[in-house]
Amino acid sequence: MSELMQRLQADYKEALRARDERKVGTLRLLFARAKNAAIEQRVEEVDETTLLSLLQKEVKQREDSIAQFEAGGRTDLVQKETAERDILRAYLPAELSDEEIRAVIRRVIAETGAQGRAGIGKVMRPIMAELKGRVDGARVNRLVAEELGG
């Protein structure tokens, strides 16, 4: 069992004892997503990288919902989604700064010799493999385009 999963389960048990319904519900949903991913991958338990990807996906989903609920004037749902997002974010590693990401991008560009917009696809795969779970893909894509002069 990964260290992150152990931490999630310990926090889940603590939330149960504390009767923190929001945290219990949020973590329970994450566990269900992890179980489904394990079934899809035909493994007993997902690895830490997959778990981090699931966490990022859930956080992004909450952020999208927050934007939609704000546009619709549903402050009650904005508060609920914000609380869930914050619970999930606590388990993600700190995001890298733009400069840290740019350093990786420059190194991969130098290694691959990519140039111009056509080189974006050539460098995205190795960059995302290296930074998986620590950055948002759209943000990396934007920085790669800037670095390659696109």
Image (cartoon, grey):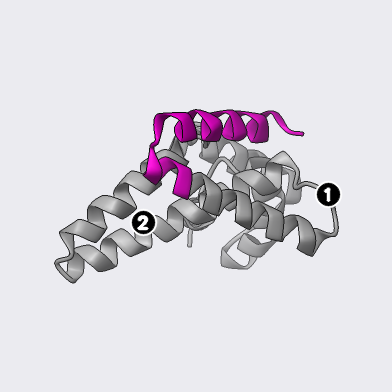
Total residue callouts: 2
- The numbered disc on residue 73 is none
Quadrant assignment, res 62? bottom left
Measured from the top left, where is residue 144 in percent x and y?
Answer: 53, 53
Q: Viewed as shown, does residue 54 lie left or right of 63?
A: right
- What is the three-letter code of the residue carrying label 2? Glu
Categorize mark 2 by other alpha carbons within 10 Å: few (<14), some (14-19), many (20+).
some
Measured from the top left, where is residue 150 in percent x and y?
Answer: 48, 62
Quadrant assignment, res 32? bottom right
Magenta span has 16? yes
- What is the three-letter code of the residue carrying label 1? Glu
- How far apart marks 1 and 2 lie (CA) works out to 30 Å
Q: Nearer the viewer, residue 114 or 108?
A: 108
Measured from the top left, where is residue 12 in percent x and y?
Answer: 53, 35
Query: Is the residue 78 above or below the residue 4 in the image?
Result: below
Q: Viewed as shown, does residue 100 lie left or right of 68?
A: right
Measured from the top left, where is residue 98 in percent x and y?
Answer: 45, 39
Query: Which residues make up the magenta segment?
Result: 1-25
Q: Residue at x 77, y 34 (%)?
A: 1
Task: Specify the farthest residue to the left.
Answer: 73
Residue matched to label 2? 63
Residue matched to label 1? 44
Query: Is disc 2 placed on a helix, strand or loop?
Result: helix
Q: Viewed as shown, does residue 113 lie left or right of 103?
A: right
Task: Specify the farthest residue to the bottom.
Answer: 72
Quadrant assignment, res 132? top right
Q: Residue at x 54, y 49 (%)?
A: 28
Query: Is disc 1 placed on a helix, strand or loop?
Result: loop
Q: Nearer the viewer, residue 47 or 31?
A: 31
